[in-house]
Image: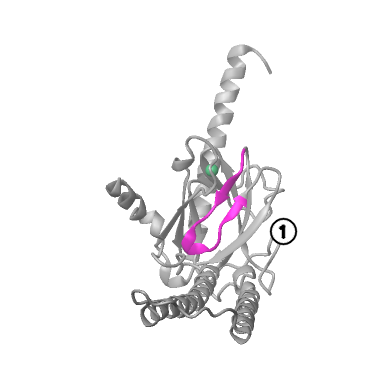
């Protein structure tokens, strides 16, 4: 039993950064992490205060054999004190959370060397209105990425990939997330928060990978039980330089065109064989 529990607790994915959410791949993930640590610090102070008072009292006021403890009820000042104290802590936590929300929700501009494209429809855009958009589509049991600015009006020959997304660094990338069949959930922990992928509904998020992380791959996986192969629905984001990204898109376009041309030849052949126009 213990071995099984230990195995689950120490599974690499279960511990994230051990104490806090993973971060380091994008400013929104960093903001989530620092907010988490702030709340954690307050919680540790409260925990130490309460447990300290408890342990101190246990030792100091330990009942000796046969002794009858003094029967004391109520201490108005203390009671008002800890009620007001708890309320103040809650107000401070709420205020800090709202102050931090902007960094988590609002994407910054791309850097000077990042790609700057006129943005497609997105809930939130950088101040200069320019971002690279990638459409994320969850399907049982794989992620499909379409590289186009406007997912609703994506051209039929828009480049796409499955499972591994290729994204340029120093560039603000907006994601337009939905699902083909059932509810899934998009989550690459190092690149920010978790977003549901729901059929018929669109969710938006973003990330911006720092230039020094070009070449790195960030992993995650579908975070909503979506069927019996849910566990196999992994996702990767490979960070590349903006010029490598443009090359990747060009290669995909060429490959797509070659595949379409080959299909057209086969179609003609089949039609000739069956005699249909
Ligand atoms: Cu899924």
> Residue under circle 1?
121
Q: Nearer the viewer, residue 31 or 162?
A: 31
Q: Nearer the viewer, residue 249 or 188?
A: 188
Magenta residue span: 182-196
Q: Can residue 210 be seen in the rendering of this structure?
A: yes
Residue 252 x %, y %: 51, 48
Which residue corresponds to the image point at 55% horizontal and 45% vertical from the top-left?
A: 144
> Can residue 164 be found in the magenta stretch?
no
Q: Nearer the viewer, residue 183 or 151?
A: 183
SS at circle 1: loop
Which residue corresponds to the image point at 63% horizontal and 68% vertical from the top-left?
A: 105
Q: Quadrant of residue 14?
A: bottom left
Q: Is residue 77 left or right of residue 65?
A: right
Residue 219 x %, y %: 43, 55
Residue 118 x %, y %: 68, 64
Where's the C terminus, which quadrant?
top right
Which residue corresponds to the image point at 58% horizontal and 84% vertical from the top-left?
A: 78
Residue 98 drawn above or below residue 232 = below
């Amino acid at each position: 039993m213990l071995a099984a529990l230990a195995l689950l607790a120490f599974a690499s994915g279960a511990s994230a950064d051990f104490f806090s959410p993973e971060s380091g791949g994008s400013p929104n993930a960093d903001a989530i992490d620092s907010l988490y640590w702030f709340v954690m610090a307050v919680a540790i102070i409260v925990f130490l205060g309460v447990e300290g008072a408890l342990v101190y009292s246990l030792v100091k006021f330990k009942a000796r054999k046969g002794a009858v403890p003094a029967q004391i009820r109520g201490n108005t000042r203390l009671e008002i004190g800890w009620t007001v104290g708890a309320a103040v802590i809650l107000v401070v936590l709420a205020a800090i959370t709202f102050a931090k929300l902007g960094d988590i929700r609002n994407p910054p501009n791309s850097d000077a060397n990042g790609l700057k494209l006129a943005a497609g429809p997105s809930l939130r855009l950088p101040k200069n209105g320019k971002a690279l958009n990638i459409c994320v589509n969850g399907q049982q049991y794989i992620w499909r990425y379409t590289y186009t600015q406007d997912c609703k009006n994506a051209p039929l020959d828009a480049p796409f990939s499955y499972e591994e997304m290729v994204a340029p660094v120093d560039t603000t990338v907006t994601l337009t997330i939905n699902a083909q069949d059932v509810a899934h959930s998009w989550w690459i922990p190092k690149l920010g928060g978790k977003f549901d992928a729901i059929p018929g509904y669109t969710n938006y998020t973003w990330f911006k990978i720092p230039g020094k992380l070009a070449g790195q791959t960030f992993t995650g996986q579908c975070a909503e039980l979506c069927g019996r192969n849910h566990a196999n629905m992994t996702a990767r984001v490979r960070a590349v330089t903006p010029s490598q990204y443009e090359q990747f898109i060009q290669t995909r376009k060429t490959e797509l065109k070659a595949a379409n041309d080959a299909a057209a030849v086969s179609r003609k052949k089949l039609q000739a064989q069956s005699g249909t126009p």
